[in-house]
Image: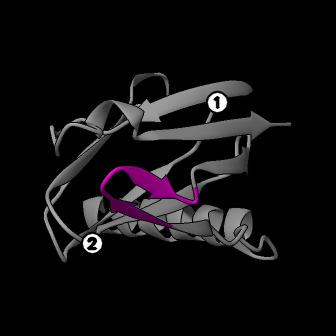
Amino acid sequence: MKLKVTMGVIVLGTMALVTTTVGKTPKPVQKIEISASRFAFEPHEITVKKGEPVTLTVQSTDVTHGLLIEELGIRAEVKKGEFEDLTITPEATGTFEGKCAHFCGKGHGSMILTVHVVD
């Protein structure tokens, strides 16, 4: 008897899962490539939508760089020739300023990435 009840719960749970996902197409994740090099991010300004996932692929072309945008929960370090995928879903609109979080030379302080989050 115990086996029948368990199997019934599994079948009903599976049916509930299928009925809630059938017919819903997940939104594609927006992808933005960002190049980090002395002493700039390229592009230096991006726009994303509130509530929609976006993957930022940050690549360093010359030395180790970082990207820090505290309000969006972004903190990464990328070594020369490597990349880091950062997937976020912004929950607040506004303009957020990111900066290089790894000292990369005397122009380091000018490395800014501006992220606009819109409705």
Q: Residue at x 14, y 56 (%)?
A: 64
Where 99 falls versus 65 (above or below)? above
| 81 is within the stretch colored magenta | no
Q: Which residues make up the magenta segment?
A: 34-43
Residue type, mark 1 in image: Glu
Farthest residue, direction right = 119
Of residues 86 and 80, which is closer to you in this image? 80
Alpha-carbon span between mark 1 and mark 2? 31 Å
Crowd around label 1: few <14 · some 14–19 · many ≥20 (10 Å)? some
Discs 1, 2 touching: Cβ within 8 Å = no
Residue 88 is left or right of residue 53, and the answer is: left
Where 86 falls versus 19 (above or below)? above
Whether residue 92 is visible here, answered yes or no, is no
Q: Quadrant of the N terminus?
A: bottom left
Whether residue 89 is visible here, answered yes or no, is yes
| 39 is within the stretch colored magenta | yes
Number of the label disc, if any, that sits on residue 61: 2
Q: Position of residue 79 (x, y in %)?
A: 13, 63
Q: Residue at x 70, y 41 (%)?
A: 51
Q: Quadrant of the C terminus?
A: top right
Q: Residue at x 68, y 72 (%)?
A: 28
Q: Position of residue 41 (x, y in %)?
A: 45, 54
Residue 52 is left or right of residue 98, and the answer is: right
